[in-house]
Image (cartoon, rainbow, N blue to C red):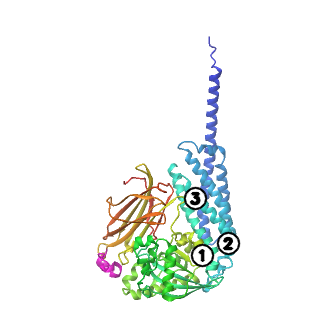
Amino acid sequence: MSDGRLPVRRRWIGWTVGIVITLLILAIGWVTIRGIGAVTELQQVAQKSAQLKAAIGEGDLERATRLAARIGTNAAAAHDLTSDPIWRAFGFVPWLGPNFTAVGDVAAIADDIAADALTPVLGAAEGLDLASLGFAGGTIDLAPFAAIQEPLSQASATLSSAEDRALQIDADATLPPLADAVREMRGVLTEAATVVGTLHGASVLLPTMLGAEGPRTYVIAMQNNAELRSSGGIIGAIALLHAENGSITLQQQGSVMDFPPLDAPLPLSESTLALFEDGPGRYLQNITSIPDFTEAGPTIAARWEGRFGGKVDGVIAVDAVVTKHLLAATGPLAFGPFTVDEDNVVGTLLSEIYAAVPDPVVQDQIFAQAASALLGAALSAAEPEALVGALAESAAENRIRIWSAHPAEQELLAASTLGGALPRDGESGAYVGVLVNDTTGGKMDYYTDAAISTSVGVCDGEPTTQVQVTWTNTAPADAGTSLPPYVTAGGYYGVPPGSVRTLVAVYGPEDALPSHIDRDGAEEGVQTTLLGSRTVVQHEVLLAPGESTTITVEFTGGGAGSRLTSVQRTPMIDSPDIDRKEMRCAS
């Protein structure tokens, strides 16, 4: 007869289940409380970071230092709240786990940045008065750069590491609000890493490159984005700078008319020949078609030396949009019959000038005046903080490329975004690229637009990276008659006036091969070649005003299918829309 009590084994199981449930409830309560606290602290980090950026932009380093200290306190608290064993254990819970892991990773990254990037940079900045750099009279005091090299190096390494760690967070596996926050953080980190990395590179390279150890000369190639080339635009103006002990002067200006086509082209790589034949080796204007500036830079130098003699120490290529950033620092600028500011300078240089001044020879003279006036204003009228910010923003948009004839300097440049080398895939993910080169022969790319998307997934059982490029001619319907012949090319190169003819090249991850290629859903003949270990596929596209076309390329093998896939592209007048889409296999 039973006494109503459960057997010992059943009681033990019941107690165990009860204890587990109790511990689980306590654990959930624990991580909930700590999670609310961590999110609150991270919200404070985000809010104060925006204030910090504003303070730095205003040159208020005292306020910036106070904000950095508070950011450090908030970030450390968030890290402490999300780094205990219980929190980490919840990272293994199905579905919810990635959210806990992501919050913990964000908190750890914020803590590291506050301690190892903000603190040393602001510490160095406190002892450095940018006004003491001595821009007045075109001279830069080079001595202070030695003091900021080490803290900038530490900060750059921390931010680069943080950027890599942020890319490893699987945002797609988290709840939408958290995914958006992670993606926003990635964008901020990429911008910060690029700016600080550029400043660190400048602190190392500027003293010698600006003549601290002897005079230097540099060719400045100014690119016109209204006629696109791989690295930004056709070379529209060219000049020679002289630098000695930090003093910079404009030594000589040249016109593209000073550089007639060569009978015997300069040597080019096989990939450049495959994509563009020998045009970049014959025509100065086309050298920037070369996708890799480590090849384009010395080719530009060779053209200058072949025309004017002497030896140059390097080449600096900038595009027209850099003027917009510089005028934000210098204020309005007058040259020829024009007065421009940051709002209208791009439109003036790339469109209005052709309507107002139809003579190409006079256009070249005005472009030369603009270059001279801009350089003078940048070195004498701009506040140093604003000028540094303008150059950093231009570099972050890949609108400045530098090559040095000195091997030690070139090694550092080639490893940075300033060097303009083709990207390398690695732990931070894979790269794909879109290169745009105009063959209309005019300046019609002022009226073009692009949209780029990537997708990663599996197609036909293979890891696949898909790249889609939509290219649009936005010119008015009457462009053939309403725009000047110099802009439309007037049909000289076989393109109907108002239409745009473009070479659109898409390259994939390293060692990946194209498995599907189409344009608007139909296959057509394309050029293919290798850029290093990357396969590049090039379409020739002809669009009438208002027309648009979409090119789709799928890559398999090698680094294809990498969740961390970034896009490199030709710098255009307006940055194209770049987004990530769900994979829909075209093959």
Residue 396 part of the magenta-drawn span: no
Instruction: Name the one closer to the observer, 70 or 275.
Output: 275
Frontmost of labels 3 and 2 is 3
Give the mark nearer the N terminus: 1 vs 3. 3
Separation of residues labelled 2 and 1 (CA atoms): 23 Å
Q: Is residue 97 left or right of residue 517?
A: right
Q: From the viewer's perspective, is residue 108 above or below residue 498?
A: above
Q: Are marks 1 and 3 in contact (CB under 8 Å)?
A: no
Residue neighbourhood size for the residue with mark 3, other residues' Cα within 10 Å, grouped as few (<14), some (14–19), many (≥20): some
Q: Is residue 164 visible?
A: yes
User: Which residue bears the numbered disc 2?
Assistant: 148
**Residue type (three-letter) at the residue carrying disc 3:** Asp
Q: Look at the image and give the residue range highlighted in magenta.
A: 480-498
Q: Is residue 363 left or right of residue 50?
A: left
Badge 1 marks a residue whose secondary structure is helix
Residue at label 1?
Answer: 407
Disc 1 residue type (three-letter) = Pro
**Label 3 sits on residue:** 164
Estimate the spatial distance between the alpha carbons at disc 3 and disc 2, rounded to whole Å. 24 Å
Please name whichever residue, 367 or 231, is drawn nearer the observer in this view of the structure. Answer: 231
Q: Earlier in the sequence, mark 2 or mark 1?
A: 2
Q: Element at badge 2?
A: helix
Spatial CA span between label 1 and label 3 = 28 Å
State whether residue 71 is above or below residue 305: above
Q: How many marks?
A: 3
Quick check: can you spot residue 332? no
Q: Give coordinates of residue 118: x percent, y percent.
A: 65, 64
Q: Residues within 10 Å of mark 2 (few under 14, many from 20)?
A: many
Which is in the foreground here, disc 2 or disc 1? 1
Q: Position of residue 131 (x, y in %)?
A: 65, 79
Q: Residue at x 40, y 73 (%)?
A: 276
In-image side of 370 versus 93 (left or right): left
